[in-house]
Amino acid sequence: MTTLQTVFAKAKADNRAALVGYLPAGFPSKGGDVAAAAALVEAGCDVIEIGLPYSDPLMDGPTIQDAVHRSLTNGTRIADVLRTVEGVAATGAATLVMTYWNPIDKYGAERFARDLANAGGTGTITPDLTPEESEPWRAASAGAGIDTVFLVAPSSTEHRIKAVVDCCTGFVYAASLMGVTGARETVNVAAEGLVERTRQHTDLPVCVGLGVGTGAQAGEVARYADGVIVGSAFIRRILDAPDEAAGRASIAQLAGDMAQGVRR
């Protein structure tokens, strides 16, 4: 299993940011999800976030919602998510699950952490789990040897940033803007300031997500962040492609541009 610590240490040694790609499990199909993620890894993604499809995705914009709906229609369940993690981890990329809390809670925190670790997963991102309610999940994750990642936002106070980073072990996810996911024309200028504020409270890597859609934007974010997180831009290309093979080729081309961007 490739750990987040290994990934960020290598990126730092290479004097670049890490590139993190997101795709939901079961999208564009069962089996097609691993193939798509493998295309991202081959093109230069260091970390892959596998989304656990959920029927009430509060943070997700319309593009990811479309992909998640397709995944749920395909009948994707937690067992499928774990199989996807296993397939993606086999590529050598550090593999996370991004999930809302309710599915973990229903599955059982200790069971989920254990099964994720056994599948080769290195950790989770839980966007709606607050620091105040996270202790049982952090304990289960520590027991299974997986990392926990939580989010800070431009609206976060210094006290809130400190509370969030104290719950993180893998990296800190800095949401570049208030609102839902989705590629945008420009990355919110507040992102750089948020990274600087967050670094005052932790030595963990700080990665920026929400709004990155081009190689140039990835390069812009890589100037000040330890990692660049991209999801909607990849998903949109798959949704717009005539078939899965064309979708893989399209996201590989974009990932290659972004991999060059984070190295500039």
Image (spheres, grey):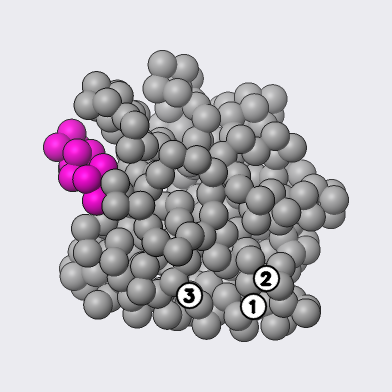
Residues under numbered marks 2 and 1 in contact, where contact means CB atoms less than 8 Å apart: yes
Numbered range of the magenta stretch: 192-203
User: At 25% from the left edge and 77% from the top edge, which residue is drawn?
Assistant: 264
User: At 45% from the left edge and 64% from the top edge, which residue is drawn?
Assistant: 185
In the image, taking residue 161 as reference, residue 21 lies left or right, namely: right
In the image, taking residue 188 as reference, residue 35 lies left or right, namely: right
User: At 48% from the left edge and 60% from the top edge, which residue is drawn?
Assistant: 184
Amino acid type shown at disc 2? Ile
State the image quarter where residue 157 is shown.
top left
Q: Earlier in the sequence, mark 2 or mark 1?
A: 2
Tell me the distance, in whole angstroms, between the alpha carbons under discs 2 and 1.
7 Å
Pointer 1 residue? 248
- Residue 249 location (% of width, % of height): 62, 83
Any mark on residue 238, and which?
2
Amino acid type shown at disc 1? Arg
- Residue 41 location (% of width, % of height): 49, 72
Q: Earlier in the sequence, mark 2 or mark 3?
A: 2
In the image, taking residue 77 as reference, residue 219 lies left or right, namely: left
Classified by dominant secondary structure, the portion drawn in magenta counts as: helix
Pointer 3 residue? 255
